[in-house]
Amino acid sequence: MRIARTVVDGHARIVVKDGSTVRLAPIDHADDALAAIESARTGVAATWPEIDEARLQLTAPVAGAGKIIAVGLNYVDHTAETGIAQPERPLTFAKYTTSITGPTDDVVVPDHVTQGVDFEAELTLLIGRRCGGATPATLDDVAAYTVANDVSARDVQFGDVQWTRGKSFDTFTPLGPWLVTPDEFGDPSGHRIYAEVDGELLQEDDTAEMIFDVPTLLAFISDGVTLEPGDLILTGTPAGAGGFRTPPRYLQHDQVVTAGVEGIGELRNRFVYRSRLAA
């Protein structure tokens, strides 16, 4: 099953896709992906009217998140290209929730702050229930999987030493296009992950190449930390991001990044420099 958020007559609405059939939640249904998953589980969603998928104007599949927890240096080849020693345990950092944007929205670069904006395709987990703390989370606590682009201002990221600000400017977390439930997505290991810039393939790997697989990440991140429904976990990016190429290939005004994970779909976001918008 797949869940998304769309705009209909100016209102954010939930849609559920089962096979080739897409159904639109009533306008008074909670604008919440987890509520939609529950409606589908109980059979309520089967009564919703069908909508033509071509009519959908998809937005970020979650309206917000209590926490966005991201993982760095989690693919073998990516860690090698950075020149940093492979971590002995997962390296985590936070992203601000105001960085979330939709799967086809523009990413607005504050180019008065950064000239080193980069892309990172990532498999992302949506937590479905309160877990962790005293008992580490497991795959059973994952409600769905989606795609994120962990947009990174490299000059800010490394200039600040810690990574949060350089990863968290507004619109720096494109998300979507669909949330895919575990019964459809299957084992999170073994899916192609990739990114293109203006149609040129620059990242391509398999989620099986994670240094720390999804169960390991869940157990580590939630050990002593309570995860809440709606929290997001970004699981790391493969080799090929622009900032680690020779010479670096940072994103320029009007370039388009396509980021995808097999079995979920693609983000397609244009990068625009704020100064060029104001001109």
Image (tube, rainbow, N blue to C red):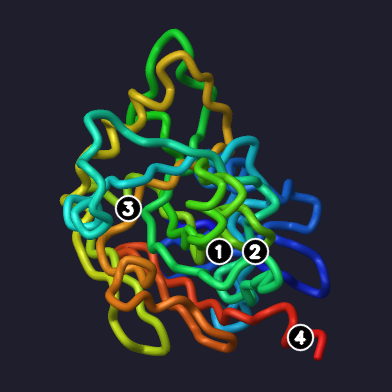
Image vertical order of residue 204 relative to residue 41, above or below = below
- Residue 12 occupies quadrant: bottom right
Q: For the residues carrying marks 3 and 2, which lies nearer the camera in this image?
A: 2
Give the position of the N terminus as an image quadrant.
Answer: bottom left
x 51%, y 46%: residue: 163
Mark 1 and mark 2: Cα distance apart in space: 7 Å
Mark 4 and mark 2: Cα distance apart in space: 15 Å
Where residue 93 appears, as percent x and y from the top left, is 48, 38
Q: Mark 4 points at which residue?
A: 277
Around disc 4, counting alpha carbons within 10 Å, would you say few (fewer than 14), some (14 to 19), or many (20 or more)? few
Around disc 1, counting alpha carbons within 10 Å, would you say few (fewer than 14), some (14 to 19), or many (20 or more)? many
Please indicate whether residue 75 sits to the left or right of residue 147 in the image: left
x 21%, y 42%: residue: 85
Q: Name the residue under label 1.
A: 174
Mark 4 and mark 1: Cα distance apart in space: 19 Å
Please indicate whether residue 147 sits to the left or right of residue 184 in the image: right
Give the position of the C terminus as an image quadrant.
Answer: bottom right
Image vertical order of residue 91 relative to residue 110, above or below = above
On residue 171, which mark appears? 2
Around disc 3, counting alpha carbons within 10 Å, would you say few (fewer than 14), some (14 to 19), or many (20 or more)? some
First in sequence, mark 4 or 2: give its number.
2
First in sequence, mark 4 or 1: give its number.
1
The amino acid pointed to by label 4 is: Leu
First in sequence, mark 4 or 3: give its number.
3
- Residue 211 occupies quadrant: top left
First in sequence, mark 1 or 3: give its number.
1
Residue 91 visible, this orientation = yes
Marks 4 and 2 in Cβ contact (< 8 Å): no
Where residue 19 appears, as percent x and y from the top left, is 39, 65
The amino acid pointed to by label 2 is: Thr
